[in-house]
Image: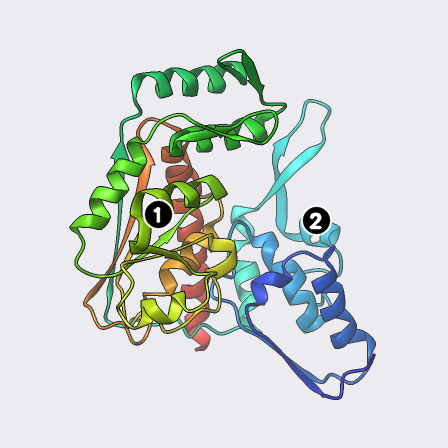
Amino acid sequence: VNLPYDGVVFDEAGFLRERDTNRWRAANHAVWKTGLVRRVIQNDGTPLPSRYENLYAPFYLLDKGERLGATKTEFRTNWSEPDVVGRDGQVFNWKIRKDKIEGIQAKVRELAVSSDRDIGVELVESDHEVQLPAEARRLYDRMEHDAMITLGDEDILAANAAVVAGKLLQLCNGFVFDERRKARAIHEAKLDAIVEAVEAMDAPVLLPYLFVPDGQALKRRLGKRLRFASEAGAKEQFRAGDLPVLAFHPESMAHGIDGLQGASNTVFWFGATYRYDWHHQVYKRLHRDGQKQSAVFVRRFIAARTIEERIIREVLVPRGEQNDGLLRALKGRS
């Protein structure tokens, strides 16, 4: 079906980072196959959520690969080098070559501008470390080293490193999925900490969580003080200042939700996420024009001496620096 327009605006263009999705194929059809579109505009608050390769697919929609490469192979040949390589020589991950960063920024700058600016509101990030109880620590260490734990008469196994990482994050938060995908409660140390922090607040709080059992546990402990963003009227109640805690999974509400900055200046993360774009876009719900306070506080509740510390140190911090570096480079054209 042909579009009845000669211009297209893609809001939240971060959803166009992968060429093998139906969303990207539909966008490509509209832009390059119909022969009607003459102007394309993309808006993206987090252009580099993980690596420079995230720019390839959305940029193809702008210039059909003229600047960054017509294929992913061409992109990697021109700009990248292997990062993680298996014993058989298979490349599992790529990274931008350091000597190519300025060059790729220059290519991006030909089409992109940054409207990111100082809004006069400080962003304060901090980590609230929670000590795992002794039994939870024993289970955590066993899963980390042996990729399995035993609860009662049931063994819970992790088939590969990615599953191990997921199990470790679950244990940090207080539960673990068993072989039947049933959540088995392990501890409430992190729940206790976040409930205490909520009770000490005299203003509304955004509370993102990562697993369904996390949300269920938070609701059980906080009761009527917490509503989920997916509930009818919850966001409106929060905006009015009448709801202490608005809880949500970041995939459902990290992008595109406005008006929360007038009610709150605090985010409590229940855990740590590998997804920098989730982390960035969540606090951007509050750190934006319309924020009434002088600072926005992002507080991550994490388990001490666990994978969560590594995620913050090795993923969130460097990816944030990389994203900020690209935005600074684009300011020269703004």
Q: Is 37 positioned to the left or the right of 230 in the image?
A: right
Under circle 2, the secondary element is: helix
Rendered image quadrant of residue 5: bottom right
Residue at (44% x, 42% y) in the render: 315
Number of other residues with Cα within 10 Å of mark 2, as a class: few under 14, some 14 to 19, many 20 or more: few
User: Label 2 is placed on what type of residue?
Assistant: Thr
Between 221 and 149, the residue placed more toward the observer is 221
Q: How many marks?
A: 2
Number of other residues with Cα within 10 Å of mark 1, as a class: few under 14, some 14 to 19, many 20 or more: many
In the rendered view, tell whether residue 105 sits above or below residue 31. Answer: above
Residue 144 picture location, percent across and down: 47, 20
Between 228 and 138, the residue placed more toward the observer is 228
Please tell me whether mark 2 or mark 1 is closer to you in this view.
1
User: Where does label 2 land, which residue?
Assistant: 77
User: Label 1 is placed on what type of residue?
Assistant: Trp
Q: Quadrant of the C terminus?
A: bottom left
The answer to whether residue 117 of the structure is visible from this angle is yes
Residue 305's disc is none
Residue at (76% x, 76% y) in the render: 30
Between 279 and 327, the residue placed more toward the observer is 279
The answer to whether residue 260 of the structure is visible from this angle is no
Q: Residue furthest top?
A: 153
User: Where does label 1 land, which residue?
Assistant: 269
